[in-house]
Amino acid sequence: MLEVDECNLIYWESCGNPQGKPAVVLHGGPGSGCVPWHRRLFDPKAYRLVLFDQRGCGRSRPHASAPDTDLTGNNTPNLIADIELLRLHLDVERWLVWGGSWGSTLALAYAESHPNRASEMILWGVTTGRRSEFDWWFRGGAAVFFPEQWDRLRAGLPVGAPHHDIVEAYHRLLNDSDLRVRQQAAEAWGEWESATTEWPPSTELDDRFTDPAFALAFARILTHYVRHNAWLEDGSLLRGASSLVDVPGIMVNGRFDFQSPIGNAWELQRVWPRAELVIVDHAGHAPTSLPITQELILAGNRFSVRW
């Protein structure tokens, strides 16, 4: 556990070869936490792999599932500072920065803030923190492809509740004083997330959301970030990609990824010439799907030879 401020401890672990190529994993969500799958993407003989659970989730404390956990300090600038604190704590000069989904946004924000600390980058399910991306997924844009699932999410709101911004509405429910209200809202949000990672839409609840503590922390942190547009100026990460001129990258995106449409990665590639885009046909946003996993392993192997 690493103490990052007076209120937060973040869980971290290091595995693989202590003398290997350093790499840091930035998980998605925000609020998903790291899982064993992340470790399996890297050759343990080649990499010194560092994983950590971002503030409020996974094994970090305090956990956002507790109603009295204050999320005020849980924001993008502080997550960037946490990554740097962990790097210094581990005495790492430069490392490969790996991020998926929300983690790709955080990876870009970190690398653009500290370009001399990113040796390479691997991103999947690419997001760049633009307002249009938040609106697409969290304010009804994607409903054109998932109308039934979107209507079910809206149906989880109390009668008479305003529907003009579903993020704000769910934020209030997820912070209600009644535990049952919070849990019902978290369950509804988990169903939306689960149904839309694949195409055709999944009818099964992702195993992660069967854990009430995970579901509540995930939904609380996610709506907290989205309602603040992740504390990023609109389009700033695309404009700031010029700072990555010396950083090679590989981006992996499913062609049927509706949560992180392939256009995000395409726009980023325009302004980041050293990034290669790998399009995985027939894949969606589910990261553990075999085709996505295979491409991420290949990306890690390609950069391991640069060590």
Image (tube, rainbow, N blue to C red):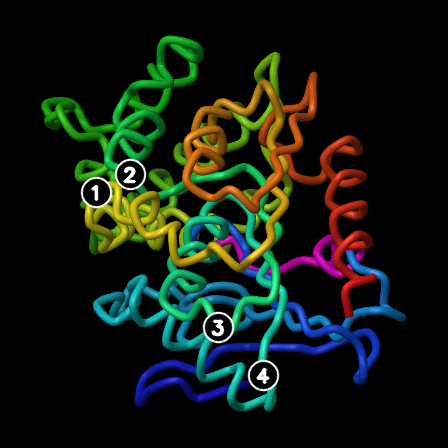
Q: Position of residue 174 (x, y in %)?
A: 28, 48
The amino acid pointed to by label 4 is Glu
Residue at the image point whose x is 38% and y is 46% from the top:
183
Q: Amino acid at mark 2?
A: Arg
Query: Upstream in the sequence, badge 3 or badge 1?
Result: 3
Q: Name the quadrant containing residue 72.
A: bottom left
Label 4 near label 3: C-beta < 8 Å?
A: no
Residue type pointed to by label 3: Asn
**Is there a contact, CB below 8 Å, between mark 1 and mark 2?**
yes
Residue indicated by mark 3:
116
Q: Secondary structure at mark 3?
A: helix
User: Dot 4 corresponds to which residue?
Assistant: 93
- Dot 3 or dot 4, earlier in sequence: 4
Q: Are marks 1 and 4 in contact (CB under 8 Å)?
A: no
How many other residues sit within 10 Å of disc 1, few (<14), some (14-19) or many (≥20)? some
Give the secondary structure at mark 1.
Answer: loop
In this rendering, is residue 278 above or below 142? Answer: below
Label 4 residue SS? loop
Tell me the residue at 39%/50% (across/down). 241
